[in-house]
Structures are given as C-alpha cells and as structure tokens.
Image (tube, rainbow, N blue to C red):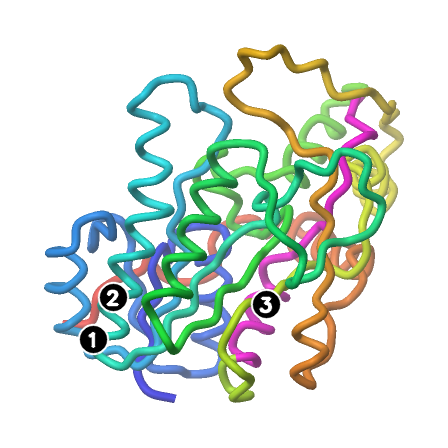
Amino acid sequence: MGRIVLLGANGQLGNDLAQVGTNYNFDLACLTHADIEIADPASVEQVLSGLEPEVILNTVACHGASQHTPAEQEAFFRVNGLGAWHLARFCQRHGCLLVHFSTDYVFGMERTRSRPYAEEDPPCPVNIYGASKLAGEQLVRAFCSKHYVIRIASAYGSAGCRAKGKSNFVKMVLSKAQNDETLKVVNDQFMSPTWTHVAAEKTYELIDSGAPFGLYHMAGRGQCTWYEFAREIVRLARLPTRVEPTATPVEGPDAAFLRPRWTAIENYMLRQAGLSDLPDWRECLEEYIETHEQSGVTKDAVPSPSVPR
C-alpha cells in the first residue's frame, strides 16, 4: 500500500485510524484542519498534490445539533457536501482511492422501523446533518470511480469527539456515574454503538482486501436504545448509578434538529465481500471500558498529527 493521507487525524475516528495505521507501519500522512481546508478546492489541490497519496481517508465532518442560523446550516453542506466533492474530483484526476466516512444519520425518517438498515435501503434523513452527509456520499459516488463510502454509527473512542469537547456518550455516562448522578436516558431511539478502534482496523482490512468499490456499513453488530447502552456502560464499569428510561421530548414544527428514532444498521456488504462482521456492540464496549476507561487511558495515543516535509 502506497502513501495514505488521513484527513481529520485529531478527531475521534481519525485518532484511531492514525493509531492503527502507525501500528501497521503504513506510510501515513496525518492532516488536521490547520493543514488543509477541504471546502476550498485550491487548498485541496495544493496540499494533496504535494503529498502524492495513493489512498485518502476522509473523516472530516461538520456535525452537531446547532443548526439554527443560516451560517450554521450552510456550514454543514459546505464541509460535508462540497468538501467531499472537492476530494472526489481530486482523487478522480489523480487516480487515488477515496475512503469517505459517513453516518447512520442518513436514515431516521421511518419512525416505526424495527429492523436494521442495510446498504440497499433508501436513505431518509430527518435533519440537516444527515442530509448534508448524504449529499457528500452521493457526490463521492458520482465523481470518484475508486471509492469506499463507509457509514459509521453512534461512535465512541478513546480520543473523544472534538465537537463534544473531546467527550462522547460513554465518557459522559461514566463521568456522571462517577459523580453519583442519576441518569435519565431516552429509551425510544435505536442505534448500533460502534467503537472507532474496531472500525479503524476494519477499514484497513477492507482497503487491503481489494473488495469491490462502493458503499459499506461498519457498525457494532446488533442494536440498542441509548438507555440500554447507558445501562450496559454502568454495569461494565461496576458503578452503582441508577439509570432510568425516558422518552424523547416532543419536537415542535419549528424544530431545527430532529432526532431520528431508528438508525440501527447492519454490515451486509462487508459480509458479502467475504470479510468478517464487526463484533457485537456489547463485546466491543466491554473491551473499550477495560482498556481505555477503567485504566484511565483516555488521551490520544498517537503523536500530534503532522504533514510530512
């Protein structure tokens, strides 16, 4: 495998892609927003052409629930849509493989669904974040012939999410539990929790396998509600904290951000490509808590990302 350029290397998924890539001794160039602006085609061309990548891993995303102002709304499509388009066009011109990471939030409109979404199911986002990520997926698939679009779901990892102050749901639950706070967690939103370390390993396995280009789901096997997830976190951490189920608040007609009720996904195309499925979400959570939270190891495990000179 030639040079790999990782975009968003200081994010939650990017951190684990960098760590795993370092362990495998890949020729890996780790870039952050300080190094490249994917929404600017001139920046994309200047930075990436100098690195001569064979593979580009794009974890860059604008996300969060703040979608009220026109500037915030425009930012989602500028980064998640147009940014992906600029990368796709660069990769097509230079013959690179583009691995573009998307989200389970491209689903969610089917509020009474009870089975996981497969790759062949029609997307149905309910908020701007999901719609902008879907736009990015479609632009990558239309403009770059050598691509893997990978949907990750309900991610957690040792680095935490930059948009959440280097936290994530697991860290938040453990923090509140250690402060002996009673937790009230929604029990009507279903998803597939995914440990970013396992997803990072599977990403490199997918690339190395030579599997057909296209769309792949990459989530922890199975599904649960956020309440069930929180209860399992507390149980595995052996904390006596009380976890109580609650319902998602009713969203008014003028709500800018709607919470999907069902975004659980299954990894059908991975299995079709002859690759093993990801482990059950409970198994991954147990290993994560034992190795990264119970031991106190919560900081980034790799050196600060940098551009090779």
Is residue 270 visible in this depiction of the protein? yes
**Residue at horizontal 49 percent and vertical 78 percent from the top:** 213
Q: Is residue 187 magenta?
A: yes
Q: CA distance from mark 2 to mark 1?
A: 6 Å
Residue hosting label 3 = 216
- Relative image position of residue 146 (x, y in whole percent): 39, 78
Q: Secondary structure at mark 1?
A: helix
**Numbered label attached to residue 93:** 1
Disc 3 residue type (three-letter): Tyr
Q: In this view of the protein, which residue sits in the foreground, 109 or 60?
A: 109
Residue 128 is situated, as x and y percent measured from the top left of the image, at 47, 33
In this picture, which residue range is highlighted in magenta?
Answer: 183-206
What amino acid is labelled 1 in the image? Answer: Arg
Report if residue 228 lies within the magenta region. no
Q: Are marks 2 and 1 in contact (CB under 8 Å)?
A: yes
Residue 165 appears in view? no
Q: Position of residue 173 (x, y in %)?
A: 71, 33
Q: Earlier in the sequence, mark 2 or mark 3?
A: 2
Relative placement, left or right, of 127 versus 182 is left
Residue at (24, 58) in percent of width and height: 86
Residue at label 2?
A: 89
SS class of the residue under badge 2? helix
Q: Quadrant of the C terminus?
A: bottom left
Which residue is nearer to you in this view: 55 or 282? Answer: 55
Q: Residue at x 21, y 54 (%)?
A: 36
